[in-house]
Amino acid sequence: MESLMIDSVNVVRRRLLTTATAGAAGVGFAFAAGPFLASWRPSARAKALGDPVEVDMGKLEAGQMLKVIWRGQAVYVVRRTAAIIDQLANHDELLLDPQSNDSRQPDYIKSQGAARARNPEYWIGSAICTHAGCSPLGAPRANNAYQLAGVDLGGKWPGGFYCACHGSRYDLSGRVFKNMPAPRNLPIPDYAFINPTRVLIGAATV
């Protein structure tokens, strides 16, 4: 009788140990698999280094702009007015490189001429001055007496960007004016339209 009781206790103990061991193994697998599975997903750093950024431009009114971050750098998205678009080719004499021959931009942008955009209504380009890396201020409307940061932008100001660090000026296609510290036009990244008001910055196609 005593032997039977001891055998029963041993059987129960073995079952408990087997269950506990299996449970521990399951927990161990979960903890081990967690980092492994997580490694399949792109990290925040990987996204910052190159993943495209989707931007909703639907709430932008004509004459407004917004700044987004892609690859850790600022990019401007500007909705240009019809008047601005119409006069983009009318101030070449003010610009250092009106044809953007010495600019960083995709070939499909260069083929768009003065607009430098896949859709002339929206200009998308770097918000980093090509002189010393400051971020130019937006002065997106043409005005014969435009004042920005206490500076008179001149009687022929066609609308654009002004870098308050060293005075460089760009038009609303990101083309730098003559006799400025900035040596070239603002770069334009790859981008593609998902629909008329949503754009993917960092990808040439969707």
Image (cartoon, helix red, strand yellow):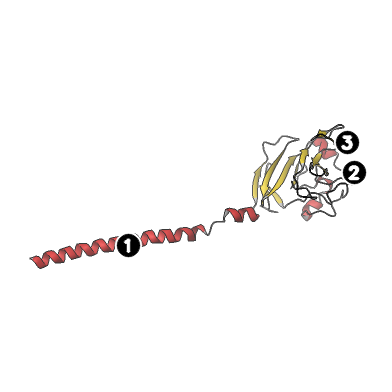
Residue situated in front as seen by the camera: 191 or 141? 141
Query: Where is 185 relative to 90, above or below?
Result: below
Q: Is residue 93 magenta?
A: yes
Residue type beneath disc 2 = Leu
Distance from disc 2 to disc 1, alpha carbons, whole Å, reads 77 Å
The label nearer to you, 3 versus 1, is 3
Q: Which mark is residue 152?
A: none
Residue position marked by numbered label 1 in the rendering:
22
Which residue is at a point 48% across and 59% down the rendered structure image? 35
Residue position marked by numbered label 2 in the rendering:
94
Q: Main secondary structure of the magenta part?
A: helix
The answer to whether residue 138 is left or right of residue 14 is right
Q: Position of residue 77 (x, y in %)?
A: 72, 43
Distance from disc 3 to disc 1, alpha carbons, whole Å, reads 79 Å
The local secondary structure at tag 2 comes to helix
Q: Position of residue 157 (x, y in %)?
A: 86, 37
Q: Position of residue 121 (x, y in %)?
A: 76, 41
Segment tinted magenta in the rendering: 91-95
Residue type beneath disc 3 = Gly
Q: Is residue 16 magenta?
A: no
Q: Quadrant of residue 167?
A: top right
Residue position marked by numbered label 3 in the rendering:
154
Q: Can residue 195 be spotted in the picture?
A: no
Distance from disc 3 to disc 2, alpha carbons, whole Å, reads 11 Å
Q: Residue furthest top?
A: 145
Residue type beneath disc 1 = Ala
